[in-house]
Each structure stands twice: as structure tokens, then as C-alpha cells.
Amino acid sequence: MKMFSPCTAFRVTATALVASLALVSASGCSRDPNKQKQKYLESGKRYVAEDKLKEAAIQFSNALKVDRNFADAHYELAKVYLKQGSAMPGYAELMRTVDLAPNNVKARLDLGNLLLAGNALDRATAQANAILALNNNDADAYALLSAIAARKGDRAEALTQIQKALSIDPNRSNFHTSLAVLQAGDPATAPQAEGEVQKAIALDGKNVNSRIVMASILQSKGDVNGALEQMQAAVAADPKNLLARSGLADLYLRQNNAAKAEETLRKTADDMPDDIAGAEMLSAYYLRTNQLDHGASVYAELASAHPKSTPIKVGYTRLLLAKKDLPKAREIVKQLVDADAMQPDVAVLNGSLMMNDGKTNDAFEMFQKAAKATPDNAQLKIWLGRAARAKGDIPAAQQAFRDATRLNPRSPEAQEGLAQISIDRRDSTTLAQVGEATIAADPKSANGYIWRGMAEASQKSYDKAEADFKQAIKVAPQNPNSYLELAQIRLIQRNNTEARSLLEQSLTLNPNSAAALRLLASTYLADKQPAKAIARIQEQLTKSPQNADMYTLLSDVQSSTGDNAGSMASAEKAMQINPGNFAAVISYTHALVASGDTSKAMAKWQQWTGSHPNDSGAFTILGSLQEAQGDQSAAMASYKKALQIQPEQAVAANNLAYLMIETGQNMDVALSLAQTARRNLPNSSSTADTLAWAYYHKGNYSSARDLLEDALKAEPNNASIHYHLGLTYSKLSNNSDAALHLKKAAALAPNTQTAKDAEKALGQLG
């Protein structure tokens, strides 16, 4: 029986057979995998040469689909990832390369430098030693060992190793630069450093690092013009080098030439519109110098010139958010989301707007997806932590912030997240630890001193706290939070005059700080000067006219003076600026209830819950309003909905437990809810009262008494607590104390159901 090729299931003539064999060879019925993977590899390299990194990554990945053990493809893919700023995937590919090709010295060197950057010094040393085991005259390995020793603070060893590298290859510009940096760190050898850098520049005039180091040396000698020349030469040598560009801008600023600094940064963004770091440098400058309106105008022009640039739009949006121009920010973010919703910077902006609009659960889910798509992005982890914290999922928030810290141990935002959770939990011990760790990592950062000071203040160690806040001001006088925290110490000390001065300094540095303005207003209210508080808020609103939080504050102060109409108008303005401002809706509700329009307030929250179906706090407020209207059934349904969304919602659990007790429902469920409320609000007299009332109905009178006695210390004029305590004493056969508290309940709440119940209980005592 004749056998047929699997590609040819029919009879063919000799001529046709030749043609079909040619076709098979070309089309791949029996394609050579070695040739195919090599083809993908070479294609990827061509894309790299054209700076098309996404396309290159696809081709290298295709090569690995053909042969997953293709070491060259792993290495090339690693280099692409690192160029894209994706350190974790780059690290994984380098590790795979070294496993498959242990003699690949370049891969080992790249891996060693990456480990050095991540502060994994012992593992970086292992890579350098592995290279030297293959070739004990490898100059790059000695240079790596020198950098590792320098990171460890062993300057003598660092000098020894770099000199070994130079003895092997005396014409390497970078080696001379590294030696110069080491020499510059010691006054005894500092004069030699300039000569070494001059050698480096002579060997390679386009060596950007050498120019930057020379600029630094000249600047330290007071030769700012010489430093400028070197930094300009660095930019000319490598126009895409952001370190050179930012260094040049910094030198202009040191000369008080803000115009040239801005011009340099603007040209960077204009020249590199697709580089997120380049665009961020300019937006960071405008944010730092508080030029929000001017910065937004510049970015509008850049966005017009580069309509397809995501980095430019990202920088533009950040400025719009800072100046509270939410409508325009939403417009730009929509364009970004339509183009690529999972791009990390786009996801961050989109999620932050969702959170601002009260769509916390949606933001959390979106951040989860984005973090899964880009697991090595610390910023996404930070925002995931913020969203988790906002929705009350503290374990998830902690994990996200810890992941961010692992990815970037020096991230102030990740540390801030961990600190904020400690503040929320009133965990002064952990807060102090975060502060200490931050100080150790960056002694020139104000945050570490601020957090440690806050921990000390919470423990009433005010002298220590004050010293830390003053140190924060010393190391970073432009940080507004240091003045804010020190002001709170002054308020505790009843020194309103100095507190106001500090708060004014905080507001000068951050005109958008509603927290500082709120405290400032409180000093006037404490002095019974509400008119001054209102005037000061209105004055600040002229500087920050799009600040919804400040209008909310104005509404609250107006409400405290009985100006319900003014309070309502201010709250409406806040909601107009930011329809998703939860606090503004609460202030609006207060004004409505104070003016007797509870139905309209309830309608507002029904509307809110319709557009924010995952907002447990909103359902809790709606339930409170329904309860106030006497609709217990609707109130309980709202509280249950809140607890479905967030099982630990303390206020909903407390209120639902109380209603269940009052309406004679399942007492075990009511007790469990009351315990949940008390666990989450351990210092609340209301949760103490509810849990005690549950204990009373379960026959646990001693526990009920203990809770109520403690609650009464916090609220000595609470009729409900007196009534419940009176009944409890009665069950414990303490009729004299029972009568005392029942009479007090009736006196505190005349003409109420509580008074009637107390009087009835008094009659039964006799």
C-alpha cells in the first residue's frame, strides 16, 4: 500500500509534486522551528532599533511560543521590559535567561544591576562573583562590586573595586566617573574628583553621567555658570535623558531663573510627548509652585499640539484635578479611558474620579483589574489601597499598601496609606513604627516626623509631638501639614492666637486645604465669633473658588448660626461643583431637616442611593431619615441593605439592632448586630446603650449595667440611657438607683414616649 504525505492526500504529476513541495516549504506544513524562532527574534530586534517596544515584545514572545527555552529571546524580552519601566517582568526574564544560559555574562550583569537597584545586595554580589568565575578580568563585574560596596557604605572597598575595573579597562568613561563620585565624597580626595571626570569626558564627550557629575562638582564649588554649561552639554549629548533635563531646570531655579526652568521643562514635554516621566516633570513643577491656572493653560496648548499623547493628557488632568475643575477633568479622562482604560496612569485618574463621585466599589473593582493587568505598578497598588480603605475593607487596604511598599520601599504614598490606616484605627503604636521607618529611609522627609508626632500627641506626649512637628518644619518648610499638626497642639493648649498663625501658614502653602480652614474656623467659633469664621471661609473661597469642601464647611458654619437658607445655598453650591461630594449632601440634609423638610432630605438620599447602589453610608443615612419619619419598616430595610454592602457598617448595625429590639424581633440577631456596632465604635455611648439594651432583653443585667454606667459618663443628660439604666437597676433589685434614673429620664425628655415609659416604670417600682 502506497503511503501519502499528510500534506498531499491525492495523486500528483511530477511537475505538480515539485510545486506542492515548494509550497509546503514556504507555507510551513513542516516548518523548521529553529528558523521560525530566529525569525521572530530578528524581527523583534529590528523593532527595538526603531524604538517600537510593544511590537518588539510581541515578537520576542512569539519566539518563546515556538521554544519556551530560547534563552536569547528571554534576554531580549527582559531588556524590552526594563526599557518600558516594568521591573518585575524584566527581573523574571533575566532570571530565566541566566537559568537557561549561565554563561551569558551580559544577562548576569544586567541582573546584578537590577538587584542592586532593588537593594538586594547579597544577590547582586552573587551575580558579580559568578561573572568573575567565568572571567576574572571582567571589568564590569568589578564595577558592579564597587557600586554594591558604595551602597553598603564601604567606601574603601568601593574604591578598591573600581580601581581594579580601571586597571583592566582604563579607557572606560563610566569607570572614571564612578571613581570621581567616590572621591568627591571625601574632603581628602575631593580635589582629585574633577580631574577624573575630565578624563571621563575626554574619553567620551557624549557620556551624560560624566557631564551631570561635573555639573554637580562645579555647582558645589559655586561655579553655577560652569555647571549650567555641563548640564546643557549633557542635554545636547542625549536629548532624551530626563535626568539631564531636570538637572538643567533645577540649576535655572537655583539661579532664580524660573522662566528658563519652566521653558526647559515645557520643551521636555513638547519634545517627548509620549514619555510619561517627561510630562510629569512639567506638571509636578506647576503643582509644586502652585501655578495651577497657568499650568492648565500650558497643558491645554500641549494637548492641542499632541492630541494623541496620553502622557500630556495625564499631566493636564492632574492639574485640572488640583484646581478642582472636575467637569474638564472628566472630559479628558473619558478620552483617555476610551483609548486604553487599563493603562496604569489612566486607571489611576479614572478611579480617583470615581471615588470623588462616591463610586467607591466601582473604583475598587477597576483598580483590582488594573493591578492584576500590571502587577508591578506600585501606584496602582496605592490607589487600590485607598479604594479599599474608602469602602471599609481595611485588611485589603493594608495588603495593597504593603504590596506597594514591597514594590517601592521608599514610596511616601505607600507609607502614608499605612499611616492613615493606623490613624483610622487609633493605633498609635503602628503609626509610630511607620513614622520611625520613614525617618530612617528619608530623614529629610517631613512625613516621618509628622506621623511620629501624631502618635505622640495621641498619647498626650505633647512636648515630644511638638519637637517632631518643629523638626518636620525645619527639614521641609514648604510642607503644609507640619503647620497644621502643630496648630492642633496649640489648640489643645488653648493658644488660639498662635494656632491661627500656624493655620494661616498652612493655607498659604496649600490654599485648597479644607482641613486647615476648618480648624481655623473652629478657633473663631470657640471664641464665639461665627461672623469672623464665615468671613474667613468666604475669603479663602476667593482663592479656591472651585473647592466643594470649603463650600461644605461654609454650609456647616452657617447651619450652626441658624442660617438655614445660607447653609442650604452653600451646600447646593458644593454639590454643583462636585455632585459626588458625600459631605456636601450631608450638609444639605442638615439644612433641610433643620428647616423642617425631612421629606425632601429623604428624597435626596433616595436619589443618591439610586445612582450609588453600593454606598452603604448612604443607605444608613436614608434609614435614619426614614426612622425619624416613623417608618420603621422602611428604615430596617435600608439598614439591612447597608449591611449587605458593608457587613461592618457600625451605625447601620447599631440602629437596626435597636429597632429589632423595640419591635420584638429575633433577639440573638439583634445582639449580634449590637456587638458588631460596639466592636467598630468602641467609644460610642450609642453603641454602648444599644448593646446594653440587647443584654437587658437577654437577661444579662450585670453586663447591661456596666455598659450603661460607662455610657452615662460620656452623656450624663441622655434620657434613653437613664431610662435603660433605671430598668436595669430595677431588675437587679436596686430600687433606689432605679427610681433615681427613671425620674431623671422623665425630667430630661418631658412629653416624650421615653418620659411616659419612665413614669410607668416608676409606678411599677412601688
Image (tube, helix red, strand yellow):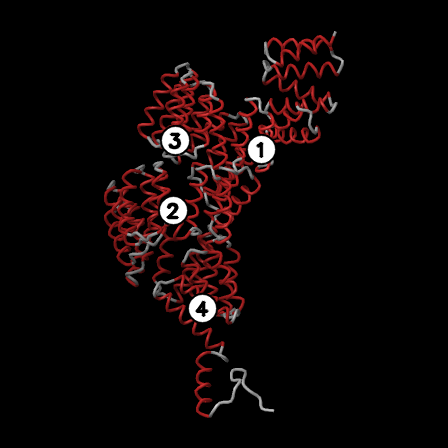
> What residue sits 60% from the left and 36% below the top?
647
Q: Earlier in the sequence, mark 4 or mark 3?
A: 4
Q: Are marks 4 and 3 in contact (CB under 8 Å)?
A: no
Please tell me whether mark 1 sits on a helix, a strand or a loop.
loop
Asked if residue 560 is positioned above or below residue 386 in the image, the reply reads above
Q: Are marks 2 and 4 in contact (CB under 8 Å)?
A: no
- For image coordinates 30% across by 62% down, the residue present is 204
Q: Which residue is mark 4?
A: 137
Marks 3 and 1, Cα distance to the nearest angstrom? 26 Å
Q: Alpha carbon of mark 2 to alpha carbon of mark 4: how far?
A: 56 Å
Which quadrant of the figure has residue 733?
A: top right
Assign a secondary structure to mark 2: helix
- Earlier along the polypeptide chain: callout 4 or callout 1? 4
Q: Choose mark 4 or mark 1, whichever is in front.
A: 1
In which quarter of the view is residue 727 placed? top right
* Amino acid type, mark 4: Asn
Residue position marked by numbered label 2 in the rendering: 334
* Mark 4 surroundings within 10 Å by alpha-carbon count, few (fewer than 14), some (14 through 19), many (20 or more): some
The residue that mark 3 highlights is: 548
Q: From the viewer's perspective, is the residue at label 3 or at label 2 nearer?
A: 2
Sequence-first tag of 3 and 2? 2
- Left or right of 738? Residue 43 is left
Which image quadrant: the N terminus? bottom right
